[in-house]
Image (tube, helix red, strand yellow):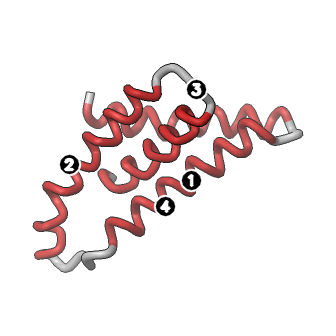
């Protein structure tokens, strides 16, 4: 989850920065927290058989899921789809934030 959340928050951070949204610094700080947690736990995970490149895969998965939700929330012509994407986006980010708060 540390890697997935790092990817999720990274995608959100880029979006917020590109759109000059308030909260970018906070999102980036959360991303950095997850990166630190990931770096601290990966050596033990690797010792237990997790491939060394797995964190990158997990991080990418987190990025892709948030990027897709952001695209739907911001550009979908279907208002219901945009609303569902926005709700899911908030839930996934909240899941990550709740882990460290």
SS for dot 1: helix
User: Does residue 92 appear to the left or right of 53 in the view shown?
Assistant: right
Q: Residue at x 33, y 35 (%)?
A: 30
Q: Earlier in the sequence, mark 1 or mark 2?
A: 2
User: Does residue 6 appear to the left or right of 46 in the view shown?
Assistant: right
Q: Is residue 39 above or below residue 5?
A: below
Viewer-closest of 59 and 91:
59
Q: Earlier in the sequence, mark 2 or mark 3?
A: 3
Answer few, some or many: residues within 10 Å of disc 4's Cα (few below 14, many 20 plus, some between 14 and 19): some
SS for dot 2: helix
Query: Which residue is under mark 4?
Result: 61
Q: Find out whether the residues at labels 1 and 4 contact each other: C-beta distance under 8 Å.
A: yes
Q: Position of residue 37 (x, y in %)?
A: 20, 48
Q: Residue at x 12, y 67 (%)?
A: 43
Mark 2 or 3: in front is 3
Q: What is the distance, in whole Å, between disc 1 and disc 4 at their CAs?
A: 6 Å
User: Does residue 15 appear to the left or right of 28 in the view shown?
Assistant: right
**Which numbered disc covers residue 65?**
1
Answer few, some or many: residues within 10 Å of disc 1's Cα (few below 14, many 20 plus, some between 14 and 19): some
SS for dot 3: loop
Q: What is the distance, in whole Å, between disc 4 and disc 2 at their CAs?
A: 18 Å
SS for dot 4: helix
Query: Which residue is under mark 2?
Result: 37
Q: Earlier in the sequence, mark 4 or mark 2?
A: 2
């Amino acid at each position: 989850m540390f890697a997935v959340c790092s990817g999720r928050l990274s995608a959100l951070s880029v979006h917020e920065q590109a759109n000059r949204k308030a909260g970018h610094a906070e999102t980036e700080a959360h991303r950095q927290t997850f990166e630190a947690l990931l770096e601290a736990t990966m050596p033990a995970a690797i010792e237990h058989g997790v491939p060394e490149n797995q964190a990158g895969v997990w991080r990418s998965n987190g990025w892709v899921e948030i990027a897709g939700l952001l695209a739907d929330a911001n550009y979908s012509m279907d208002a219901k789809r945009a609303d569902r994407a926005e709700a899911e986006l908030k839930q996934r980010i909240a899941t990550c934030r709740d882990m460290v708060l």
